[in-house]
Amino acid sequence: MKLLDEIVLWPDERLTDTCEEISEITDEIRDIAKRMLQDMYATDGVGLAAPQIGILKRMVVIDVDYPDGQKNPFVLINPEVITADGEPRTYNEGCLSFPGITVPVTRPSHVVVHAQNLDGDLMQYEAEGDLFAVCLQHEIDHINGITMPDHLGPTARMEVLQRYHEALAAGAKPGETSFDEDE
């Protein structure tokens, strides 16, 4: 199976489920994290949540430095947003589970997240006004069963999902996005 085939695409129900907490960091959890990082890098993504590969666990991987040629991955186990504030900012977000489109999502510009790393240490991640802030919120949304279109009103959501279906029909694959001028 190719890595791209492992990415769960909307409307798969696993993308709308709330994921289970991870009670113990085992070798299986470490293997899942390794697989998630491989999938993320293979699709040129900057983040991936476990439900996007069909695993309903509260785990995400993020590496916003990778597009600049430098790997700096984070594995977050049971991440929780502690603070989400600051000036709201709209960012055209892409998602491996919604190939071929971007969606304008408005989020707080500042976020503080607590999570365990693979060693079981409690970590704090803080970001403001950058891709890391967006990515933290986007991936944590995934483990809570929330997808990009869920942030839109009914009409905009229908339009985005229509574009998504058209992109899929045209052969869009995970990691491919479009940047429409009218978004």
Image: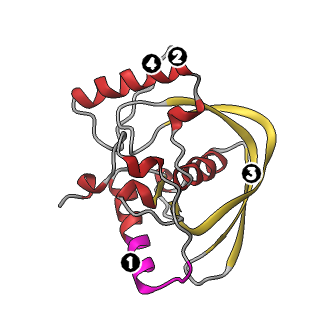
Label 2 close to label 4 by CB (< 8 Å): yes
Query: What x and y, as percent, mark residue 87?
Result: 80, 35
Query: At 41% across and 26% down in the image, what residue appears?
Result: 161
Q: Which residues are magenta?
A: 23-34
105 within the magenta span: no
Per the image, the residue denoted by label 1 is 31
Q: Is residue 124 above or below residue 42?
A: below
- Label 3 and label 2: CA atoms lie apart by 28 Å
Whether residue 73 appears in this view of the structure is no
Which of marks 1 and 4 precedes in the sequence? 1
Per the image, the residue denoted by label 4 is 159
Per the image, the residue denoted by label 2 is 155
Label 2 close to label 1 by CB (< 8 Å): no
Q: Is residue 101 above or below residue 84?
A: above
Query: At 59% across and 33% down in the image, what residue appears?
Result: 151
Which of marks 2 and 3 precedes in the sequence? 3
- Label 2 and label 4: CA atoms lie apart by 6 Å
